[in-house]
Amino acid sequence: MDITGIELRHLRYFVAVAEELHFGRAAQRLHIAQPPLSQQIRKLEEAIGHPLLLRNSRQVRLTGAGEELLKRAQQTLRKVAEDIQSTRRIGRGEVGTLTVGFIASAMLTVLPSMLSEYRRRFPEVELRLREFYTSGLLDALRNGTADIGFTRDADQEKSLHTEVLLPEPYIAVVSAQHPLADKASIRIDDLRSEPFVLFSPGVGQNAWEKVMRLCQQGGFRPRIVQEAPHWLTILRLVGTGMGVTIAPKCVEKIAHQEVRCVRLRGANIFSHLELAYREQSLTELEENFLTLARETFRQ
Amino acid sequence: MDITGIELRHLRYFVAVAEELHFGRAAQRLHIAQPPLSQQIRKLEEAIGHPLLLRNSRQVRLTGAGEELLKRAQQTLRKVAEDIQSTRRIGRGEVGTLTVGFIASAMLTVLPSMLSEYRRRFPEVELRLREFYTSGLLDALRNGTADIGFTRDADQEKSLHTEVLLPEPYIAVVSAQHPLADKASIRIDDLRSEPFVLFSPGVGQNAWEKVMRLCQQGGFRPRIVQEAPHWLTILRLVGTGMGVTIAPKCVEKIAHQEVRCVRLRGANIFSHLELAYREQSLTELEENFLTLARETFRQ
DNA sequence: TGCCAGTTATATCCATGAGATATGAATAAA
DNA sequence: TTTATTCATATCTCATGGATATAACTGGCA
């Protein structure tokens, strides 16, 4: 038997004998009989090429080589146990790094409390948060810059999987001075002749088209007087009377005094907050995160 | 299979697959067929409780847990190899510490060059040298303060083994002014009426008795006027004309102008320079030293 | 001196399981 | 669709780890 024939079994047995200095007690501790223990120790000694234990039928002692190997084998056994623990913790998704991309409006939902809960449950996962527009987030997911993304109305992509977390109705946002400002609800075609301030189309083809289709159902094409990249900007502009906008319902959370949010009656198109990730190769880390996300948004 | 069922074999196999990312090539590298390799990897995954490799029949990839285990298993395999190397070096007696005790007169023989040669051959052995009288050296050997001793005419001790390295004839040392000073050789009974300066009897019963027997063969009991613990002291005293002495032949190496060394004709008692050590449990380190000592003194 | 007790080594047998061979299943490329 | 590649499954064989029984050795004790 050469070195490649040495197994952890030999080290476990040797450590037991070296610690007990007694084959019988060591065998008991290992839950095997004494003769096979003697045999395995002999094989180890043959593989190493030197005696490790001096036995006369009255006492067992370690040779110098045996003392050295005892010290090192104890280390090795401890190390292997630790290695397995550590591997299991990663396997359970308890340790590691997870980069989560999100669009700004996702932070207007239960996402913040979900992230908070995740940190509580998995304190040893380093959670990196990065804000994107949906289109940029899809790129980031594809090239691995982000592991999981919260997107809105993402375009379908091969290699990326998306699932709807939260379907939100659209609302109209108008200036507080606007004639429609105090209505409980309006119909989309009430806005046909209004100037529009809309989210920039660069954020995603699909998101843009949903708004266009909504207007189309009202029988008009919106007259766009301004585009802007953030809902806060858009709401401020709407507040000045520059125009009206159509937004997912969650945006009402950041509505201020100068604007009013009005429900859109009869609209059957929804804005979708989605969970997006690379289809293949979900780690346990990612699975754990996804599971919590689904649970949180289901309510 | 739980953790105690994990063997180095599993780690070796896993590292091969994880490095090759290909079961077939890994199996070749391990000189086994592919199916048993797959089986062993599966067992390892079951023991750990998490998948380590993601395989679809086109490619093999590591999971996060797999990457962790790969890194750690590589370390473990390297460590075990180093442990065995290190153990073997100690087994070969190439590393360690050896305490050698000796009597002063041993340094008048080939011992110094033997020690020099030993250091050349075993540079990683720390050689500790301690000077004793024979009786003290035997104590030191018994209680483990010294591992190997160079003694002279040691008393027999159970548990200590002694072997003769160098039988030396006795010589007479007289003052340069002494009537016998210029004889090529004398007989022991030529000294019958001389005053004697002798080595202290405390150094050992046997050594003392040998000198007594030598005188007895000359038909007299020596008249001892002085005892001293070092040959250099004795020779100085002899040089002053205080008396004569009987010494092992090697002492002539430190004879100075005021004394003369004279061969003793017809004496058949020899002083023995010996090698002494605990009988049981000679380490390779000690064996190597003893072998070189025997070789050196044989010449 | 010889017997006893305690301990390790040896002999032999059995059963587990590591590994081989043959084949199936899955998937990407042609 | 076919083919080539690759991993998994099924089955068999044989090596070997472990059990049992016993021998050999050694120190203590009568």
Image (cartoon, coloured by chain):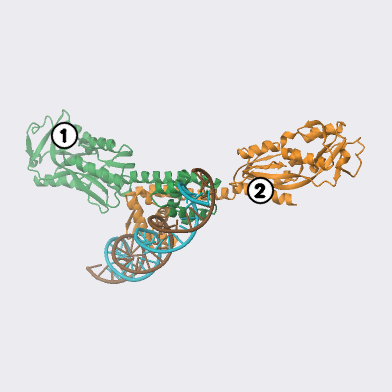
Chain colours: A orange, B green, C brown, D cyan
Q: Residues within 10 Å of mark 2 (few under 14, many from 20)?
A: some
Task: Please state which amino acid type lies under the numbered disc 1.
Answer: Glu
Q: Which mark is residue A290?
A: 2
Chain to which the residue tagged by mark 1 belongs: B
Percent coordinates x, y for residue B151 in the rendering = 23, 44
Front in this rendered view, residue B169 or A103: A103
**Does dot 1 land on a helix, a strand or a loop?**
helix
Q: Which mark is residue A22?
A: none
Distance between the Cα atoms at labels 1 and 2? Answer: 93 Å
Chain to which the residue tagged by mark 2 belongs: A
Res B255 → quadrant: top left
Front in this rendered view, residue A166 or A194: A194
Front in this rendered view, residue A205 or D27: A205
Task: Please state which amino acid type lies under the numbered disc 2.
Answer: Leu
Which residue has dot 1 on it?
B252
Q: Residues within 10 Å of mark 1 (few under 14, many from 20)?
A: some
Front in this rendered view, residue C10 or A206: A206
Say left or right for A29 vs B103: right
Rendered residue at 7%/36% (across/down): B185
Q: Count the marks: how many?
A: 2
Relative to A119, residue C21 above or below: below
Percent coordinates x, y for residue A56 in the rendering = 31, 58
| For discs 1 and 2, the disc positioned in front in the rendered view | 2
Rendered residue at 58%/46% (across/down): A281
Rendered residue at 81%/30% (across/down): A226
Q: Kindly tell me whether residue B242 is visible in this rendering.
A: no
Quadrant location, the C terminus of chain B: top left
Q: Kindly tell me whether residue B194 is visible in this rendering.
A: yes
**Does dot 2 land on a helix, a strand or a loop?**
helix
Discs 1, 2 touching: Cβ within 8 Å: no
Say left or right for A87 vs B85: right
